[in-house]
Amino acid sequence: ADENDPSYEGVSVTKGESVTSESPKNSDGSEVPSGSEFSIPADFKAPEGTTVSVDKTTGKVTVKTSDGTPVGEIKVPVTVTYPDKTTDSTSVTVTVKDAAPQP
């Protein structure tokens, strides 16, 4: 896993909506090895009213917010387990924005 250093592009979401990140890529633009598994550490606590999940196979992180989700950044940690059982840690930053006021 020496040549792997997966990272995510940050995403933003309006509160009350959902957003899904892209799969993480290595800094040279290459894909994470096929057969890698992605998980969110059990000790990660999403903000109140927010559900965070990761696709075990693709690494795409989905964040579902509610009207009660605080505005600001949520840093979601992701553990990558490679086929050789080595692991890496990365994270995706999700920026939660206020909904535009209704006229």
Image (cartoon, rainbow, N blue to C red):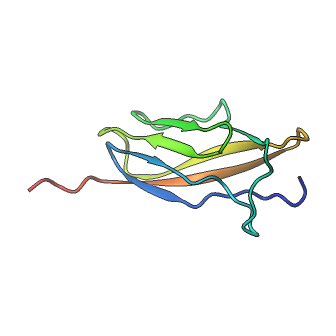
Q: Nearer the viewer, residue 44 or 36?
A: 36
Relative to 67, 83 lies left or right: right
The residue furthest left is 103
Residue found 33% across the figure and 47% down from its top: 15
Measured from the top left, where is residue 2 in percent x and y?
90, 57
The residue furthest front is 34
Tell how many labels. Answer: 0
Query: Relative to 67, is 10 above or below?
Result: below
Residue found 75% across the figure and 63% down from its top: 30
Relative to 99, 71 lies left or right: right
Measured from the top left, where is residue 98 in percent x and y?
30, 53
Query: Relative to 43, is 11 above or below?
Result: below
Residue 27: quarter of image: bottom right
Q: Nearer the viewer, residue 13 or 49?
A: 13
Measured from the top left, where is residue 42 in percent x and y?
66, 29
Residue 44: quarter of image: top right
Residue found 66% across the figure and 55% down from its top: 24
Quadrant in the picture for the C terminus: bottom left
Relative to 36, 97 lies left or right: left
The residue furthest bottom is 28
Q: Nearer the viewer, residue 24 or 75?
A: 24
Residue 85: quarter of image: top right
